[in-house]
Amino acid sequence: MGFGPVVDAAWLAENLSIVVVVDVRWSVADGPGREAYAAAHIPGAVFVDLDVDLAASASATGGRHPLPEAEHFAAAMASLGIGDTTRVVAYDDVGGIIAARMWWMLDVIGREVAVLDGGIQAWTGDLSSAVVARAPAVFTPTPWPDERLISADELEAFLGTSLVILDGRSAE
């Protein structure tokens, strides 16, 4: 199995030394999964906080997790030891929906990234409770590509057409 967009646990076990593994566990009820990370994570994994690293502040117009400014995202990735040429494997514990956000954010700006198929539950190797701190890296801020985003006004113009709209938010 090659690299991305999904890798299995066997591939990851064989390639831990050439990727940065990121734990992006988060839940609507509890928020960031920092406690779960501290208790047990894939060895070498760094914790990525959805609320802090992968989103701007919530707002009435932007929603719960609007995209952060490119500079903020780049600084967060760099501080975690993720650089311009770093291969990243993201996992969560809820079927990949949070890891998929990390995947999309890196993929849409041209970085190499994959999601661990089955999340942490698929990992059969040892787990660690050691907090991982990687040396900072160089991650160049890259604007979110306008052609991959749609504004509310643009979306409204498509209502009633053959456009299929999928709402991936939680019920509330």
Image (cartoon, rainbow, N blue to C red):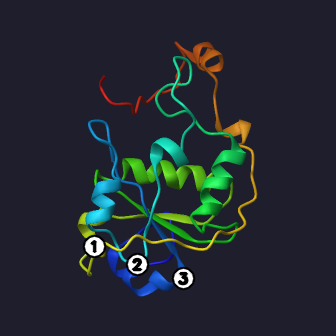
Examine the rendered structure and indicate whether residue 138 appears above or below residue 146: below
- Asked if the residue at tag 3 contacts the one at tag 1, i.e. Cβ–Cβ closer than 8 Å, the answer is no
Examine the rendered structure and indicate whether residue 9 appears above or below residue 161: below
* Residue 39 % position (x, y): 26, 65
Q: Amino acid at mark 1?
A: Trp
Q: Which quadrant of the rendered structure holds the N terminus?
A: bottom left
Q: In terms of image quadrants, where is residue 172?
A: top left
* Residue 153 % position (x, y): 64, 15
Crowdedness of circle 3 by 10 Å Cα count: few (<14), some, many (20+)?
Answer: few
Crowdedness of circle 2 by 10 Å Cα count: few (<14), some, many (20+)?
Answer: some
The residues bearing labels 1 and 3 have C-alpha atoms spaced at a distance of 17 Å
Crowdedness of circle 1 by 10 Å Cα count: few (<14), some, many (20+)?
Answer: some
The residue shown at (30%, 52%) is: 95
* Residue 19 % position (x, y): 52, 76
Which residue is denoted by mark 1 in the rendering?
123
Give the left or right position of residue 118, taking residue 97 as reference.
Answer: left
- Mark 2 and mark 1 lie on one chain; the one further toward the N terminus is 2
Which residue is denoted by mark 3 in the rendering?
18
The residues bearing labels 2 and 1 have C-alpha atoms spaced at a distance of 9 Å
The residue shown at (65%, 19%) is: 154
Which residue is denoted by mark 2 in the rendering?
12
The residue shown at (54%, 14%) is: 159
- Asked if the residue at tag 1 contacts the one at tag 2, i.e. Cβ–Cβ closer than 8 Å, the answer is yes
Secondary structure found at label 3: helix
Secondary structure found at label 1: loop
Q: In terms of image quadrants, where is residue 91?
A: bottom left
- Mark 2 and mark 3 lie on one chain; the one further toward the N terminus is 2
The residues bearing labels 2 and 3 have C-alpha atoms spaced at a distance of 9 Å
